[in-house]
Image (cartoon, rainbow, N blue to C red):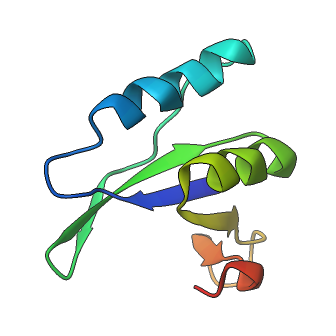
């Protein structure tokens, strides 16, 4: 599971520290996906091995919950979670 977060102007600041602390409290290593730029906006992706942790992270820090596309469906990639309205 992936949580994609739009970067605010000026960066994440102390929120980035809190995001790393989120992982540390759970004994997890923070894993980021590729950074993306779309319509003059930067996005950062946080990767999780389970949906419950990804949902908790998204609830705490915002962003869009994205799940891996099943292999073979369209050659791979990511799909937005329809519950997130993305």
Percent position (x, y) of residue 11? 21, 45
Residue 83 location, quadrant? bottom right
Look at the image and tell me whether residue 29 can be seen. Answer: no
As drawn, is 58 to the left or to the right of 46? Answer: right
Percent position (x, y) of residue 21? 55, 19
Q: Is residue 37 above or below residue 14?
A: below
Residue shown at 19%/82% (left/top)? 39
Percent position (x, y) of residue 54? 72, 48
As drawn, is 84 to the left or to the right of 7? Answer: right
Q: Quadrant of the C terminus?
A: bottom right
Look at the image and tell me whether residue 59 can be seen. Answer: yes
Residue 41 location, quadrant? bottom left
Residue shown at 74%/76% (left/top)? 72
Percent position (x, y) of residue 77? 57, 70
Residue shown at 69%/15% (left/top)? 25
Q: Quadrant of the N terminus?
A: bottom right
Name the residue nearer the viewer: 48 or 73: 48
As drawn, is 64 to the left or to the right of 33? Answer: right
Residue shown at 68%/18% (left/top)? 28
């Amino acid at each position: 599971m992936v949580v994609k977060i739009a970067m605010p102007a000026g960066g994440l600041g102390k929120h980035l520290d809190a995001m790393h602390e989120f992982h540390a409290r759970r004994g997890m290593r923070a894993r980021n996906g590729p950074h993306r730029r779309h319509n003059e906006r930067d996005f950062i992706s946080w990767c999780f091995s389970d949906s419950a942790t990804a949902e908790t992270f998204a609830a705490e820090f915002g962003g869009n919950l994205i799940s891996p596309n099943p292999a073979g469906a369209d050659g791979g990639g990511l799909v937005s979670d329809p519950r997130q309205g993305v």
